[in-house]
Image (cartoon, grey):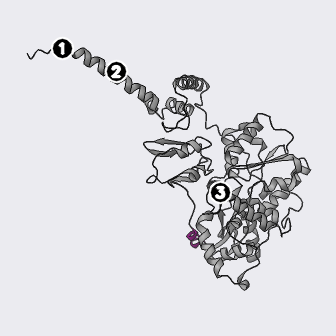
Amino acid sequence: MTKFFHSVMLEKNKCVGCTNCVKRCPTQAIRVRNGKAVIHSKRCIDCGECIRVCPHKAKKAATKKISIIKDFEYTVAIPDPSLFGQFNNLKDINVVLTAIKKLGFNFVYEASRGAELIMDSIKKLLEENRIRTPIISSACPAIVRLIRLRFPDLCDNVLELEAPMEVTAKLAKDEISEKYGIPFEKIKAVFIAPCPAKVSAVAAPLAKDKSWVDAVISIGDVYPLLISEMSKLSKDDIEDIAKSGSEGIGWGVSSAAARTFFNEKYLAADGIENAIRILEELEEFRIRGIDFIELSACSAGCVGGVMCVENAYVAKAKIHKLMKDLPLFKNSVDGEIPDFLRWEKELEFEPVLKLSEDVGEAIALMDKMDKLYESLPGMDCGSCGAPTCRAFAEDVVMGRAKQNNCIYILKDHIEYVIDTLEDTLKKLKGVTFDDS
């Protein structure tokens, strides 16, 4: 599996080359070429912004359909906490969990259980002063991938603990295998996800060779099915499945982990543009006195994922309401932090923005790019298919575009050709040709 896998896919028949996605992509991973959007795998972090802003619905996440569970002998559903914010008047998450089982799953384990274990582990590490601060939460895979591509000096600050879905998948398989005698490898974990970044985190993990999650389905796809099943449930049908506290469920919204432990020494930001601003300031040492930084690519947190159905801030309010009557935690780490909560590999910077592996050649290309950029209008209009004039200059230098893709250069060229033709025609007037 390529380490540059991305799960956001283009439906070419719907794409009209409007450049909305080009302008909003935070890593400049999209171009319009030959009238269609093109996604560069090496730069895509699967934040889902292109899906969010495309007016023609030409982008989608490559998730599995729920019918995938028919291919597995034993299945455990792992719903992201953001799922619980999608429903009106929900007072007990057991209603949702029971409905999930009715869809054909053998077991259900909330990802919020894993979230609580991670929170407890963070607390232990900070209290024992065993990690470098400021720590950047590793919960959002889009943020982790962003750091890997753009912020080399911050790779060591990323918390080397697994995401809740991974922790819960391992926990669920272990418990089910031990309790029911089912071989570990026969139990398949299916994550119910709010965003495409989770799909990529499963297909191409950055911190280990293989994910414990076996398939990812979309909240948007499963939502109508759950609504139908929930409407059929009587009070006696509802199973007591939930084993999460309020803070685990609160993981579905922004600043969940940060506000739990860190009084004035934490910082939380949501939305990809805000997150990038924080990372830039952190890399420039303009942020000080902070122990923990929690960043979410989606506004309001995971409830703002493009695969959710409810308005992000409405869903956030619903989750806060759900949290009120629950104990803080139902899951904790006893003793040392278990290995399955930790990353198996360190996060490595991937210099995908380099012009060349050869330093001399890279300097020459940069000089050429700078000179071309100075000749461009600086409008950043996107008409060339690139997000900025600077990005267009890079594309030209790297052979991915031609100079006359810029409408201003093309206009000047056309005017020059017309003027030349006019001058030629004027000179030809009065000239006679010998028929012989």
Q: Secondary structure at mark 1?
A: loop
The reply to whether residue 73 is in sight is no
Q: Main secondary structure of the magenta part?
A: helix
> Circle 1 is placed at which residue position?
431
Q: Is residue 70 magenta?
A: yes
Q: Residue 165 appears in which quarter of the rendering?
A: bottom right
Q: Residue at x 30, y 17 (%)?
A: 423
Which amino acid, by three-letter code, is at mark 1? Val
Direction from residue 178 to residue 72 in the image, left or right? left
The residue range painted magenta reads 65-72
Q: Residue 73 appears in which quarter of the rendering?
A: bottom right
Mark 1 and mark 3: Cα distance apart in space: 71 Å
Which amino acid, by three-letter code, is at mark 2? Asp
Which percent across, then down, holds residue 51?
A: 57, 53
Q: Secondary structure at mark 3?
A: loop
Label annotation for residue 305: 3
Q: Is residue 59 magenta?
A: no
- Number of marks: 3
Q: Earlier in the sequence, mark 1 or mark 2?
A: 2
Which percent across, then down, holds residue 187?
A: 67, 70
Which percent across, then down, holds residue 156?
A: 77, 42
Direction from residue 361 to residue 327 in the image, left or right? right
